[in-house]
Structures are given as structure tokens and as C-alpha cells.
Image (tube, grey):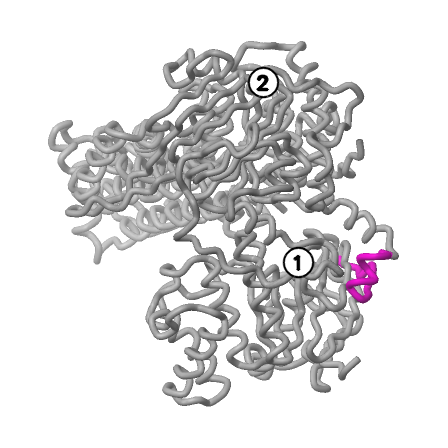
Amino acid sequence: MTTETIEAPARPERPQRAYAALFRSPSGAVGLVIVAVLVVCAILAPYIAPHDPLVMAAGPRLEPPSLAHWMGTDQFGRDVLSRIIYGSRLTLMIGTIAVGISLSAGLLLGLVAGYASGWTERVLMRIVDVLFSFTEIVIALACIAILGVGLVNAMIAIGIASIPFYARVTHSIVLVEKNKPYFESAVAAGASHARLIFLHLLPNVIPTLIVIGTLGVSTAVLAAAGLSFLGLGAQPPQPEWGFMLSSSRDLISRAPWMMIFPGLAIAITVLGFNLLGDGVREVLDPRQRAR
Amino acid sequence: MSETLLEVRNLTVSFGRGAGRNVAVNGLSYELARGETLAIVGESGSGKSVSSLALLGLLPRQGAQVEGGQALFNGRDLLTLSDTERRKIRGDRIAMIFQEPMTSLTPVLRIGLQMTEALVEHKGMRQREADEKAREMLRLVELDDPPRRMRQFPHELSGGMRQRVMIAMAMALEPDILIADEPTTALDVTVQAQILDLMRGLKDSFGTAILLITHDMGVVAEMADRVVVMNHGVKVEEGEATALFAEPQAAYTRRLLAAVPRLGALSQSDAPRQVVEAGAPVGKTVLRADGLCKTFAGRGGLFSRGTATVAMSDVSFDLRAGETLALVGESGSGKSTSGRAVLRLIEVDEGQIDLEGTDLRRLGGAALRRARRGMQMVFQDPFASLNPRMNVGRLVAEPMTIHGIARGRDLEDRVVELLERVGLEADHTRRFPHEFSGGQRQRLCIARALGVGPKVIVADEPTSALDVSVQAQVLELMLELQQSLGLAYLFISHDMAVVEEMSHRVAVMREGRIVESGPRRAVLNNPRHPYTSALLAAVPKPDPTAVRGKIPPLDLEKLPMGPLSEVEPGHWVAT
């Protein structure tokens, strides 16, 4: 029997390729650097921060940026730079916990609804639709009203509020994948429900959700900052960026640095995660992979 | 020969730059004379489409570039024209029709508006005149009731009708050259025959030169005066169609022609070609489908019920070990639905499916999954039928893992054995599907299906997405596997020549019903149903000397679609 020429160049392992590709896209590289800096700050906070973020009167009160206090001090004499560095821990925590909750719950809902079809699908997706019809912040406020004020509760609230979004995205991807012949081929091979869901659907849903989740971190950070600003999230003396913003509100004309630097930190973090999300999308895009 | 209209010299087109540069067309030269049909033939990746897109400046802006050459048309080089000048020529002097009639009309605009747009733009006609011209063109392409068609939207027309509209649009401008890129590939064979007839007729009455780009040697033989054969971006042969088919010079052309399945090649034999010595004989019945019915409920609105579509109505057949039953029909005939129903990928409304004495419709859950071991499926699109995130080793192993046939070292050995069995290599197990070509992927699908030792394989158009030389190899592999393993194939296809090559028995389907069934030799040599005859007559023959008359239109309303009756032993026809 004649065999066609078999030529498929050896490729390096996949993860390696993914990182390399991430660095090749400029936005991905910038995003990756910003997020990496943030992670390093969070991990090494005690070693990099020049002062204790909580100790009052580390310097004179409301001191403008100087060599001793690069970003100045707040009304209690706490070092703003140190508070921002320690705040990165809370920010990352908010991002991961909130996205973790919404992603896992949304994924589960969407997968089950999309796979099951029929009544299960209709009921689940209508519930999601109802939740979707409220603004996320309203749901978050409702959750906080039930759970009580506090940063952890704020994270949970934000997580719950964006479940419908992830559920919908997952559901629509599942519907597309379920109609592809490879899925039918697995059914025809006699695959069990668990196998179909976890080996065939899940791996094809995950890449898109990684992209959306990365982008979602920035939304979560913003939402948490917003809740803290309203006094529903972080409580004093936690060095949370949104809370720092809100406590500087009255002093905006006397000590603008108290507002500028946490604001910048939030903005740059959000930008970083957005860029990273875009980069990841480019890397995971099948058309990119095909090259 | 009459005057030269278009002269392409040394056209070179490439994609990408630097190390990734890929030359798609390399030094292509040809001439097109007024009023002739020149076919550019080649398999996928031969550069046949790219070369003609380059003429009209339709190459993707990113990545593709014309590296050199000239395309002289009326003394001007098309390749160096400015965008504005080129736009004037495009549509006016040179028109193009594309493969996909479903997407080449704008869905949101009425046919009339789309047709008159170019007339107003290029010919400076007033809307009234343009409307009149458009109606006349629709009449010329044999569409009924042109005024009504002009008011319709593209989705209201069938694929064949849309392609007629496309042709009418292109010809309305009375271009010197019509570039037709696979104009009939997406159409059913009977519709294809009509469209080809139409193009021939229009060419004669308008004196337009046609540049026909196709992979189908049958279409070439039927249409072309001269032929350019391309392979990997290079012209390998050029010549008069009759001479080229009779005595191909280049080795590639000979291989290509040899790979084309020819209807009638096996008309004197009952069984497919023997590729294995002492192959497994046709045995006892393994699969029996009885009275299958399936209606897809239309999606109704809030207050309406929606129209239901009958996909299968009283479909019955049986299949014996070592035998191939071909389900033949055009799109929408229910042949794919029947294949899926047999595997219970679709639940039927009524009927029985009996696999080796087990009624599959009674099984549920685990029992059904176990029963599926006896039947596997090979799909049409090898690019979508393999999970892109599993490597080849896992893909091939999966059905065996599911049914607990082998594990560990033993499983790996069996995977390697299967890969080698279908002509792939053992070290392919770590690769992912996207690293393989279409033909290789189809081999993977077959290997995957074979692992569990099925009795029946449902093959849904397994080669229609493949190039003909690859198709020939895959069909050969399937024959060899059948004859050495005694597999039964339910072979779903629209291609009569392939069906003849593969099958023992044939069932012709139309609108969800079997209209004729019986031994292949009887059905193909002596069709009793008018629809079967029409299908057979419409198949383009890869032989330019075979003159085919215009196919009489089939009166679809009057086709017998009733219950089957036996006209000779085993040969059943609808009454």
C-alpha cells in the first residue's frame, strides 16, 4: 500500500511554546511583567516595604513624597508606599478568590446545563438569566447585606455576582463543542458521561475561560476597590487600595499623593491583567496554534 | 486560435516573510484566449486559487505578496494597477464567482439590489435599466419568475439557485473573463450538472472566456478546452483537454488521473475490487434497521408550532458481515441521519435497530455503551472529528480504554499496532491532530474505530473532504481492512463513482425515504427509479470525448415516493 509522505516537524513541548508566544506578543509581555511585579511585591512584601504598613507615626503625618517616604505618608503617619506594597497581597487575594468562585461555579453550571440539555438546561439557564438581569454590583451588595461587611465577604460577594457571566460563556462554548464530530465520535465509542464532560468538553472550554478569567481579575479588583471605597469591603486598618482611596477623600487638596498612588496602583494592575488576558487569548487562539 | 485575452507570465506569489516564507505560486505562466475555457486543476495547496485571486488583487493584505511576474490584460499589467483602476476592471471586465453560494451573497440585501448595484456602478445605468437587465439575466440563468426573485433575500433561495444568481450577476456586466473558483463544489451532483450546462451555454452566447479553477477532473473534462495542471505552486503540464486526458505527459497528471474514480469501471462485477487474497466472504446479517422514522420538530415561535422536517421515513435495510451497503443521496436526503440513527447518536421516533440480535433501541445507559463496541463511526470532516486537545496516542487508545480492552504497556502496543495497520508511524503517538494532513487524520479516525474490534463501521462521507489521490489511498485502506477483517460498512456518500468502487449493495435515498435499493450492479447498471437515473446521468465523466446531452429536468412532484416493491430478486424500487 502506498503511504503518503509523513512530514510533521518535531515541535518543542507545548508549555514552552506557550510562554515563548506570550513574550512574542507585545501586550502579553507587558501584562506579564506587570502581573509578575505585582506577585513579587505580594510575596516579598515584608522584605521590600520600607516601613510597617500598619504602624502609625512611621513618619510625620501627611508628609509629601520625600526620600524617606517615596509616596508620602497618610493622616496617621503611615508610609503610603509600604501600604501599597502590602495592599498588593489583598488585591491578588481578591482577584484569585473572587474569580475562583465565579469561574468554578460558572463552569460547573454551564457545563452541566450545556451537557444535560432538555429540562435541566432550561431551568439552570433561566436562573442564570434572572441573575444576569441584575447589575453585578446590586447582587454583590445583596450578598454583603446577608454575609456582613468585610473584605473576605466582599470577595465572596463579587465572586457570586459574576457567576452568571461565566455560566453563560461556558454554556455557549459547550453547545458549540457538543455539536462537533469529535464529541459524537466519543459518544459513538461508548464514552461515559464523566468521560465526555471531563475529557472532551472541559479541556476545550478551559482555554477560553482562562482568558476570560484573567480579564475577570481586573474587574474583580475594580469591584472590590469600589466596595471598599463605599466602606463595605476592607476595614481599617487594612491597607486595601480602594479603601485607601476612600479614606483620602477628605484630604484630596491637602495630600493628593494619598489618592494618586493607590489610584495608580489600581489602574496599572487592571491594565496589567487586561493586557495579560489579551496576550493569553492570542496564544490560545487556534489560528495561532496552527502556525 | 483567436486573440489572446489574458497573458500571465512568471507569476510568483508567496505567503509570509523570512524563514517562514512559503511560495504558493512559483513562476506560473499561461494564456487565455477569447471565448475559451481554461481549467486550472490541482489538489489542495497547489496554488490554483491563489494564482487567480492574485489577478484580481484579492489576496489577503496581511502576509501574501505578489513577488513577480506580469498579468497582461488589454495591454495592461493587472498586477501593478492601482486599487481604483483594478476595482474598475474587477466586476466590469473580469468577473468572479466563488465556491460557496451560501456566503457570497450579502444576506441582508435583496437579490435585485445586489444584482443592479454593479450595473449602476460600472455601466452607469439608471436603476430602471439595471432592473430590466437584471430580470433578463435571471431569465437567462433559467430562474423562474425573475421579478419575484429580485425581491427575495438570499436565504430564501437554495444553493443552486444562489449560484445561478451569482452567475447572472457576473454575466450581467458582459465581462471578457469569468473566473470561476470551484463553482459547483458545494452543490449536489444534479444541480452541478445544471450549473455546468448553464455556464457552457452562457459562454457560447456571450463569448466570454472562462478561467475555471477546480479539483474535479470530471468537471474539467466536461468544461475545459485547455487545461493547466498545478502541483505545489508549479505548473506541471498544460495542453488541450482531449490530448491531456488521452495522453498525460507529466507523471503527476498520470497519477492524478489514475486516482480519479470512474463510474462504470466495475460495471461487470458484483463486488468491489479484491485487494486481499482470499478475503473474508460476505457472511450473515449483523445489522438490521427496520422502519426507522425521524421527524425534527421545527422551532416554533410563541404562538406557532413551526414546521416539522421529516428526516427519515420508513427506512429499512440490513447489512451483512464483510459487506458494504452504500447509502446514496443528495444533501437533505436523510442519509447521514440514518447513519447516526443506527448508532443511536440520534434517537429515532419509530423503528427497530438490531445489532447481532440485540435491539439497540431498548438499551440504555451502560448497556448501550457496551453495545457501542460493536459499531464505530468515521466522520466526513477529519479536521473536526478528532479532539484537538488529545494527543494521537490517547485518541487512538480512547475507545479501548472505555471498553477496558487493554491497559498500560499492552494498550500502548496495541495503539502502535493500529497506527501501523492504517499506514501511520509508531512515533506519531505524542503528536496532536493539527500536525497531520487530512488524509492522515482520516487514517487516525479509522485506527480509532478499529481498536475495539467493531463488526460495523458507519462511514459518513469519509473521503469527500480529501484530495482525490488521498481519497484513493483511504478507500484502498478501507477495502483492505474490510476484506481482511470481515468488517461491514454502512458507507454514506453522494459520489456515485466512489460508491461503485466500494459497495456490494446500494440504497438510494431522497427526502428521507429509500427510493431504490438492491445489489450495486443492478442498481447502477439498470436503475429503475427516475431519480437514480438522474443521479447517475449527472455524474461528470473524466473523459472529454464523452459528449453528454443536456439533462432533462426531473419532475420532482411526480417522482414515485411510495412503498418499495421488488422488481427483480433483491432489487426494490419505490412506486
Residue at horizontal 49%, vertical 37%? B573
Neighbourhood count class around disc 2 (C-alpha, 10 Å): few under 14, some 14–19, many 20 upward? some
Query: In the picture provided, is B81 more to the left or to the right than B513?
Result: right
Query: In the picture provided, is B232 more to the left or to the right than A208?
Result: right
Residue ID for mark 2: B454
Camera sees residue B490: no
* First along the sequence among labels 1 and 2: 1
Identify the image quadrant of the N terminus of chain B.
bottom right
Q: Which numbered marker is on residue A111?
A: none
Neighbourhood count class around disc 1 (C-alpha, 10 Å): few under 14, some 14–19, many 20 upward? many
Residue B435: x percent and y percent? 66, 38
Q: Is residue B237 magenta?
A: yes
Where is residue A82, by image quadrant? top left
Residue ID for mark 1: B219
Question: Which of the pair A23/A106 is nearer the observer?
Answer: A106
Count the numbered circles shown.
2
Where is residue A54, by image quadrant? top left
* Amino acid type, label 1: Val
- Secondary structure beneath disc 2? loop
Asked if residue A255 is positioned above or below residue A99 in the image, the reply reads below
Query: In the picture provided, is B38 more to the left or to the right than B398?
Result: right
Q: Is residue B124 magenta?
A: no
Asked if residue B398 is positioned above or below residue A19 in the image, the reply reads above
